[in-house]
Image (tube, rainbow, N blue to C red):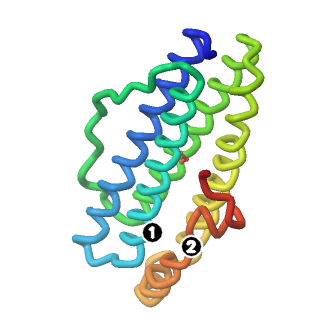
Amino acid sequence: MLSKKVEAALNAQIRVEAESSQVYLSMASWAEVKGLEGIAQFLYRHSDEERMHMLKMVKYVNERGGHALVSDLAAPATDFGSFQKLFQELFDHEIMVSECINNLVHVTLEEKDYATHNFLQWYVAEQIEEEALARTILDKINLIGNDKGGLYLFDRDIQQLSVDSAASGTGPA
Ligand code: OFO
């Protein structure tokens, strides 16, 4: 059984995961209308993954006798300026999510909820992979600079990149 404090903290994280999915969906749509097809596909997949993260947590909360809440969400931005700025924003967003996960893990220790602590280790590992992936992408973007041919190849190659490939197949259960 979840304590009220852990349940509330998990529900707050459910909202963060849902908002992440919305942010990446909005980024995907922006990239698609800009003709950045590979980047758009990458971001649509990323959005789906965030929804999976949310669902995994919804099911856990309900399984443990809590009530997972679906709340209203902040509207994401609709214009991301440039693909360089977009990926910087994605990286910053993942750093923010990692902090949220860390705080959540801290709450489970305070509450001596070792089952939830254990459950959250999957998210801890996932954030390491997502941060590493975002950092790799930023490095590639720095290499490209303003080279149009480089952007063409980047847009083509990013279709192959996903968190799952970086995390050697450890997707949500
Ligand atoms: Fe849910 O992993 Fe990114 O944010």
Q: Where residue 110 appears, x then y in whole percent?
A: 73, 11
Task: Count all numbered tags in the image, as a single digit.
Answer: 2
Residue 9 in the figure: left or right of residue 125:
left
Q: Residue furthest bottom?
A: 149
Using the image as rendered, state which of residue 136 and residue 60 is in the foreground: 60
Q: Is residue 164 positioned above or below 154 on the image?
A: above
**Residue type at tag 2:** Leu
For the residues marked 2 and 1, what is the alpha-carbon distance in whole angstroms? Answer: 7 Å
Q: Where residue 149 appears, x then y in whole percent?
A: 44, 90
Residue 65 in the figure: left or right of residue 129:
left
Q: Where residue 160 appears, x then y in whole percent?
A: 54, 78
Categorize mark 1 by other alpha carbons within 10 Å: few (<14), some (14-19), many (20+). Answer: many
Q: Judging from the image, what secondary structure is the residue with disc 1 in?
A: helix
Q: Which mark is residue 135?
A: none
Mark 2 or 1 closer to N-term?
A: 1
The verdict on label 1 being within 8 Å of ligand 1 is no
Q: Residue drawn 51% across and 27% down?
A: 62
**Residue type at tag 1:** Phe
Residue 147 in the figure: left or right of residue 37:
right
Categorize mark 2 by other alpha carbons within 10 Å: few (<14), some (14-19), many (20+). Answer: some
* Quadrant of residue 44 within the rendered picture: bottom left
Residue 45 in the figure: left or right of residue 91:
left
Are the residues at dot 2 and dot 1 in contact (C-beta closer than 8 Å)? yes
Q: Residue drawn 53% across and 51% down?
A: 91
Q: Residue drawn 56% across and 73% down?
A: 161
Q: Is residue 48 positioned above or below 154 on the image?
A: above
Residue that badge 1 annotates? 42
Residue that badge 2 annotates? 161
* Quadrant of residue 64 within the rendered picture: top right
